[in-house]
Amino acid sequence: MSRKEPRIRIGSPAHTVFEYALMLIGSLIMAASFNSFLNPNQIATGGVSGISTIVQHLTGLNPAITQWALNIPIFLLALWLLGGQFGVKAAVGSVIFPLCVLVTSHLGVPTHNPLLASVYGGIGVGLGLGIVFRGRGSTGGLGLAAQILHKYTGLSLGFSVAVFDGLVILSSALVFTPENALYGLIGLFVTTKTIDIVQLGFNYAKVAFIISDHTEAIRKAILYDLDRGLTELNGSGGFTGESRTVLMVVVKQNEVSRLKTLVQSVDRQAFVILSETNEVLGEGFKRHA
């Protein structure tokens, strides 16, 4: 049976349009969450959007104006210091998110409870960012600034991002209240976890490594009884130095018990290592995007 061709070929004009559509949709979701939950409750979760919340409180300036005023120079600085590796998408993202903030500025405020605002705002921003990342895009801002810091100081990229977000949240504690800063940390945490969910999904699976003296029998049981493919890896015993075959198989959550039962029915002394994996692409699992 021939393999199905992907619905949109990567690199095609249609795929490019699709990626830009994801950037727009993600930016709209982020902007709506910012205007409905975070900004009205003076919760700064980091980034240029957090700075715009602080600036609006101090000066009354529209957050979109502040975001444009920061995003564009940061992008140009990154282009100068880091080269043209960011391309058109980073430039578009630096402009499109503030535009979405401006367009959605009329949205109502569902809650003035800061805890609910930080949670739901964090979910919305994480959902939007995850969609933007799915489109291989960027919203620019302090993410680019973190890459500059990373290149010229040797600090890890993750730590560089944390430095900028931390400074924004610390500033919110001074401008607003320490309690607002704590809600900002909650929002930032929820955003990070939501991005992981959007990127990796809920389709958790298990990777099993099986070491046994009855490899062939276990292999047949997995192939024909469990109906799962597997890979044979070459290994050697750390103590004996003897060559061993290690079976690697990926199974869904609801197949774990069945796998363990099959292995034990063949060899009760088999050594089985089960490890969790967040996303599996390929035959029998999730299709490639």
Image (spheres, rainbow, N blue to C red):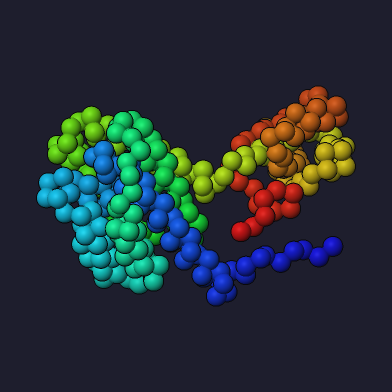
Q: Position of residue 34 (x, y in %)?
A: 33, 47
Residue at 75% from the left image edge and 28% from the top image edge: 257
As drawn, 116 above or below 289:
above
On the image, which quarter does residue 27 sit in?
bottom left
On the image, which quarter does residue 114 sit in?
top left
Farthest-out residue, top: 268
The foreground one among 253 and 206 is: 253
As drawn, 242 above or below 87:
above
On the image, which quarter does residue 12 sit in?
bottom right
Q: Position of residue 80 (x, y in %)?
A: 26, 71
Q: Quadrant of the C terminus?
A: bottom right
Whether residue 131 sits left or right of residue 207 in the image: it is: left
Q: Quadrant of the N terminus?
A: bottom right
Residue at 82% from the left image edge and 38% from the top image edge: 226
Farthest-out residue, bottom: 13
Farthest-out residue, left: 59
Whether residue 10 sits left or right of residue 66 in the image: it is: right
Q: Position of residue 24 (x, y in %)?
A: 43, 61
As drawn, 115 above or below 55:
above
Whether residue 251 sits left or right of residue 51 in the image: it is: right
- Residue 267 visible in the current orientation: no
Residue at 70% from the left image edge and 48% from the top image edge: 285
Q: Position of residue 288 (x, y in %)?
A: 64, 57
Q: Across the whole image, how many numbered discs are drawn on residues?
A: 0
Residue at 36% from the left image edge and 32% from the top image edge: 116
- Residue 50 visible in the current orientation: yes
The foreground one among 232 and 29 is: 29
